[in-house]
């Protein structure tokens, strides 16, 4: 099992989840984050940190976002590691947590 970043992250890209990952499994794409499934240790530290609830265990990804399982696997291999908190992107509907 691995955790998966899904559609709600697109154009939000909050990075609190990446900052708590003990194995640096998060990768930074242009408009969202991805999780490298071969590195993820299923610790669940990232999920509660996501203010837009975009992270799921692969077996709980809603059917509408199932394609994100393969998208994370593919794009994480070509995206750089992210482990620090960065200023998020903004889109309508994104939660705006306090920094």
Image: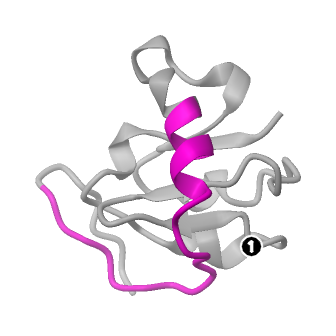
Count of picture labels: 1
Main secondary structure found in the magenta portion: loop
Q: Nearer the viewer, residue 68 or 86?
A: 68
Tell me where residue 76 appears, x and y as whole percent: 58, 56
Please state if 59 lies on the left or on the right of 75 as rendered.
right
Magenta span covers which residues?
70-91
Classify the position of the N terminus by image quarter.
top right
Give me the residue at 42% from left, 85% from top: 86
- Above or below, 92 against 79 in this view is above
Tell me where residue 56 appears, x and y as whole percent: 62, 36
Please state if 33 lies on the left or on the right of 95 as rendered.
right
Give me the residue at 49% from left, 33% from top: 68
User: Which color scheme does this rendered protein use?
Assistant: one colour
Label 1 packing within 10 angstroms: few (<14), some (14-19), many (20+): some
- Above or below, 55 against 76 in this view is above
Tell me where residue 92 appears, x and y as whole percent: 11, 53
Residue at the left extreme of this rendering: 92
State the residue position of label 1.
24
Residue at the front extreme of this rendering: 78
Give me the residue at 30% from left, 61% from top: 31
Q: Is residue 47 magenta?
A: no
- Above or below, 87 against 45 in this view is below
Give me the residue at 54% from left, 62% from top: 78
Q: Is residue 79 magenta?
A: yes
Tell me where residue 19 appears, x and y as whole percent: 64, 78
């Amino acid at each position: 099992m691995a955790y998966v970043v899904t559609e709600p992250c697109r154009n939000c890209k909050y990075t609190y989840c990446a900052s708590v990952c003990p194995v640096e499994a998060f990768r930074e794409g242009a408009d969202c984050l991805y999780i490298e499934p071969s590195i993820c240790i299923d610790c669940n530290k990232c999920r509660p940190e996501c203010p837009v609830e975009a992270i799921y265990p692969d077996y709980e990804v809603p059917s509408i976002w199932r394609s994100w399982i393969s998208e994370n696997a593919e794009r994480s291999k070509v995206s750089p590691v992210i482990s620090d908190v960065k200023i998020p992107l903004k889109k309508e509907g994104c939660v705006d947590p306090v920094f």
